[in-house]
Amino acid sequence: DRAKLLFRLASVLESNIDKYATLITQEMGKPLEQARGEIRKCVWNCKHYASDGKNYLKPQEIKADEYMKSFVQYDPLGTVLLVMPWNFPFWQVLRMAIPVLLAGNTVLLKHASNVPQCALAIQEAITEAGFPDGVFQTLLISSSQVESIIRNDKVVGVSLTGSEGAGASVASIAGQEIKPAVLELGGSDPLVVLEDADIELSCSIAEKARLGNAGQVCIAAKRFIVHNSLIEEFLVKLTDIFASYKLGDPMQITTMMGPMSSSSAHEEILEQIRQSVDQGGKIITGGGEAIISKAKFIRPTLIRIENTENILWTDEVFGPVAAVIGFDTDEEALELANDTRFGLGASVMTKDRNKAQYFIDGIESGMVFVNDFVKTDPRMPTGGVKKSGIGRELAWEGARVFTNKKTVVVVK
Ligand code: NAP
């Protein structure tokens, strides 16, 4: 029955794609076509769990000859609070909510305060799809009200996607209440370009990995680690791509990058660029702002850094700015890739399977993509290690995360 509702939700989203995409664009500024892509991904997500989700939740038999039956079944826990960010206002919510609902839980949503219309539209879509009243409820509340909701006895767990500070606060309250918390936090993903990599492909992946959604992506590659024999060519080719980016009205189909989501986000990125330069960073392209019709943009920026004390290396940069550093040996590249408190995703560009395996094994992150940029996918678990979070979303992990994994033994 729940799967049928998910199919209906997919069709509500599909038939209102322009309405929902427009809301996303108006509230947080991503180009309309990228917003449409976000809704299409939500449709895929609903269809995936509607058709394959029950396999994730099937009881798992355990072989034990002395018992007539022994298995683990996945029972829903109850009401789960989701605290969500604005950067993918539909996708972030639905990628967590759909598997959680499929498992039989109910959801309370506290969305970011700058996307209230998206928050209400998601609830409206879920109601239109025919979900029973109260199964999904948007709460228009401030972050200071989150604590009392986590502490409410009817709430059994919480999932937060956002900054480290918010994650630490929510998880500590959940800890006091002995309730599970899933945290999807920041990232400073490396893109490692090895000596044998295809340079054209590497530049194209670097562009997609850093400039989509104006760089406001947790799994964006933020640190480009490039073999010294390729770095000059890499910078020249990538500069051409970055400098040709068309900034402007996100409602226009030709616009490649919209404004930053807020004035404060814009200011923060400009400050990070200033500090990086003060610390010896060399601007290769971009490096400044553009104000178009009062909207505040950051130009796609490449900054070459010589050491890992630079702010672009030590901090997460939530905008279209990449740090580039060179290396000579694979060991050095791996050390650089892991030289961060984050561990969300990582990309490695190489044609050599053995080298790829060396990085797959050595990189400390929740996801590694070889010859591609890191993406979320309803079929694959997503999440991070180190300060990037606790737990996983999506696939069987997402479906089971808020369940009671009940061990059952029947003797006869
Ligand atoms: P944020 O300030 O932490 O906000 C995220 C959500 O948490 C919002 O709903 C916010 O509400 C709420 N919130 C903030 N402080 C809180 C607190 N002390 N207690 C309870 N709730 C609180 O994050 P952001 O700056 O908007 O988003 C960017 C960050 O999210 C980046 O670090 C990015 O990497 C991370 N992110 C991670 C993932 C992932 O999957 N790992 C995905 C997307 C983004 P208000 O809006 O009302 O403050």
Image (tube, grey):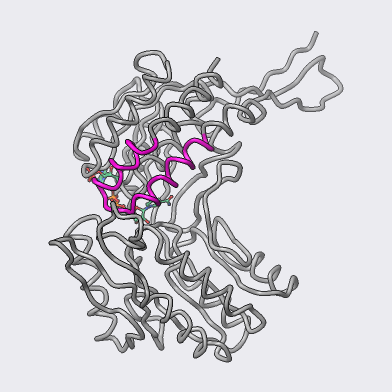
Rendered-image quadrant of the C terminus: top right
In the image, 272: left or right of 50? left
Q: Quadrant of residue 244?
A: bottom left
Rendered-image quadrant of the N terminus: top right
| Residue closer to the observer: 208 or 311 | 208
Q: In x, y percent, where is residue 375? A: 52, 54
Does the stretch in magenta take in 32? yes
Q: Residue furthest right?
A: 65
Q: Residue furthest left?
A: 294
In the image, 107: left or right of 394? left
* Magenta-tinted stretch: 17-45
Q: In the rendered image of this protein, does residue 224 appear above or below residue 292?
A: below
Name the magenta segment's main secondary structure.
Answer: helix
Residue at screen point 64% across, 78% down: 197
Q: In x, y percent, where is residue 340? A: 44, 69
Residue at screen point 53% across, 27% down: 403
Q: In the rendered image of this protein, does residue 355 appear above or below residue 79?
A: below
Q: In x, y percent, where is residue 191? A: 52, 71
